[in-house]
Image (cartoon, helix red, strand yellow):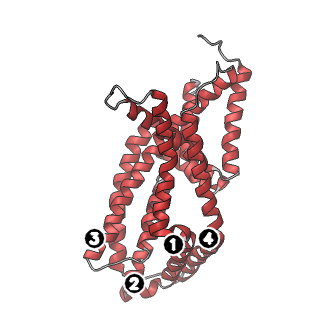
Amino acid sequence: MLHAPATRGVLVASYLLMAGALLLVMWRDLLPGLLCVCLGFLLTRALTQWFARLPRRPSATPPRAAQVAAAALVMLLPLGLLALGLTHSRGYIVEAPLQYRELLNYMARTVLELRQKLPPDMAAHLPEGAAEIQRVIAGYLGAKAGALAMAGRAWLAGLLFAYVGLLIGALAAVRTPAGAPGPLARELARRITLFGEAFRQIVAAQFWIAAFNTLLTALFLLFVLPYWGLRLPYTPVLITFTFVAGLVPIVGNLVCNVVITIVGLSVSPLAAAACLGFLILIHKAEYVINAKVVGSRTQMGVWELLAVMFVAEAVFGPAGLVAAPLCYAYLKKELVAARLV
C-alpha cells in the first residue's frame, strides 16, 4: 500500500519532536537509558535473526516464539550477570564511587609529591611555577573526589535507568504493528531509524574499540608490569575506568592516559614511563581504527568531532562528551537524507 508523501507540517513536527526528545534526555540525565534502549533493540533484532538461521527441524520454533525468546534473553541476561557480580564482587559494584574518590585523592597526593617522586637532577629543572600548578591540579582532583562522595545514589539510579532502557528496547523490537501508521508516525519512524543507524555505526564500533583497549590495558597492568616487578595500586578501578573512558572517542583516551600515568608515577618514574609508552602505542592504533571505521562510515572529521564534543561538554557536562558523536552523526544523516549536504 502506497502512502501519500508527508506534508511540510508533518515533517517539521517530526523533527521538532525528535529534537525535543533528545534535549529532554540530556536535560534529565537519561542518556544511559537512551543508549540501552538502542542497545536492547539492536541486540534483540540480532538474536532473532540468529535464531532464524539455526537449522530447521519439524518442531522448529516459529518466528514469533523466536522473537520472544530473543527478548527474554536480552532482558534476563543482565539480571544474571548482576547477580553473579553481586555474589563475587559486591563491594566493588556497590562502593564504586567511593573507590574512584579514593583514586582521585591518591592522584592529588601524587601530584603534590611530584618533586619527591622524580630523580633529584630532573626535579631541580622544574620551573618555580610548577609548585603552584601542582596545587591547582591537586585542588581540582580533590574537588572532583568530594563530588563523588554523594554519588552512590546516582550510580544506582543510572544502573536502574540503563536496565529499564534495555527492557524498553527489547520490547520495542518484538512489538506487533497495530494497523497502518499515520503520516506523523511514519516520519517519526524514519527519524528513529536514522538515529538507530548512527548508534550502530558509532556506539557499537566504539564499544568494541573500548573493549579491545581494556583487554590490552588489563594484560599490561596485571601481567606485564608485575613481570617487571612493578605493581600499580587501584588496578581493578583503573581497568574499569579504561573501559568507561574508552567509550568517549579521542578525549576519553587522553584522560585515561593521564590517570594511569599519574598512578604509575606514584610507584616510580620508570613505571610512569612504561605506562605512558604503552598507552600511547595502543591509543595511536586506536586513532587509526576510529578514523577508518567510524570516520569513514559517518563522514566525520576529527576536528568536527572534537568541536562538537567540547561544545556538548560545556552545555551538558560529561554526558555531553558521550552523546555528542552519536547526536552529531544522526544530524549529518538527517542532512544527507534531506540532500542539504
Report helix, strand or loop for mark 3. Answer: helix
Please name which of the two marks, 4 or 2, marks the residue nearer to the observer: 4
Mark 1 vs 2: CB contact within 8 A:
no
3D distance between C-alphas at marks 1 and 4: 16 Å
Tell me the quadrant of the picture where the C terminus can be found.
top right
3D distance between C-alphas at marks 1 and 2: 35 Å
Residue corresponding to mark 3: 224
Q: Residues within 10 Å of mark 3 (few under 14, many from 20)?
A: some
User: Mark 4 or mark 2: which comes first in sequence?
Assistant: 2
Q: Residues within 10 Å of mark 2 (few under 14, many from 20)?
A: some
Can the viewer see residue 175 in this picture?
yes
User: Mark 1 or mark 3: which comes first in sequence?
Assistant: 1
User: The residue under label 2 is which amino acid type?
Assistant: Leu
Report helix, strand or loop for mark 4. Answer: helix
How far across and how far down the image is residue 138, in percent?
Answer: 56, 78
At x 44% / y 48%, what residue is drawn?
206
Quadrant of the rendered structure where residue 170 is? top right
3D distance between C-alphas at marks 4 and 2: 30 Å
At x 57% / y 38%, what residue is drawn?
171
User: Mark 3 or mark 4: which comes first in sequence?
Assistant: 4
User: The residue under label 1 is which amino acid type?
Assistant: Gly
Quadrant of the rendered structure where residue 270 is? bottom left
User: The residue under label 3 is which amino acid type?
Assistant: Val
User: Mark 1 or mark 4: which comes first in sequence?
Assistant: 1
Residue corresponding to mark 4: 148
Please name which of the two marks, 1 or 3, marks the residue nearer to the observer: 1
Residue corresponding to mark 2: 118
User: Mark 1 or mark 2: which comes first in sequence?
Assistant: 1
Q: Is residue 238 above or below residue 77?
A: below
How far across and how far down the image is residue 41, in percent?
Answer: 52, 38
Residue corresponding to mark 1: 91
